[in-house]
Image: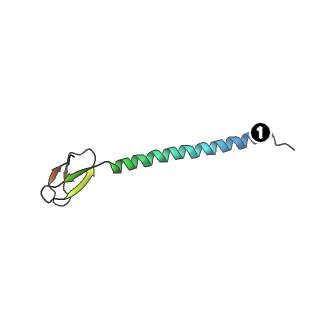
Amino acid sequence: MATPPNFVFSVLLYGLLVLGLFAALWVYYDRRDRALYDAQRRKISFHCIRCNHLYIEKAGTETAPCPRCGHANVRLKF
């Protein structure tokens, strides 16, 4: 006895929808994790001229206060 064509089409469609959902979730989480990693990786180094402390801050800042003594320092340029 052969299976009706409507049933085969329904199973095939369901399988493709599930695969599409997994692919969409994979792309979404891959992009989200890459953006978080890049934000953590892009830091700027600072050196305090008052207490000789090295520290890092977020990208985009040219001056930052030292976490130890509070003196405002400019970023290190290599």
Please provide percent x and percent y for residue 77.
20, 46
Q: Quadrant of residue 20?
A: top right
Horizontally, residue 45 falls left or right of residue 35, namely left
- Way the structure is coloured: rainbow
The amino acid beneath tag 1 is Asn
Q: Quadrant of residue 62?
A: top left
Please provide percent x and percent y for residue 17.
63, 42
Horizontally, residue 54 falls left or right of residue 23, namely left
Q: Which residue is mark 1?
A: 6
- The total number of labels drawn is 1
Label 1 sits on a secondary structure element that is helix
Residue at x 13% of width, y 55% of height: 49
* Quadrant position of the N terminus in the picture: top right
Residue at x 18% of width, y 61% of height: 68
Residue that sits furthest to the left in the current view:
50
Residue at x 34% of width, y 50% of height: 41
Please provide percent x and percent y for residue 50.
12, 57
Label 1 packing within 10 angstroms: few (<14), some (14-19), many (20+): few
Horizontally, residue 16 falls left or right of residue 75, namely right
Residue at x 40% of width, y 46% of height: 35
Residue that sits furthest to the front in the current view:
78
Residue that sits furthest to the right in the current view:
1
Please provide percent x and percent y for residue 19.
61, 44
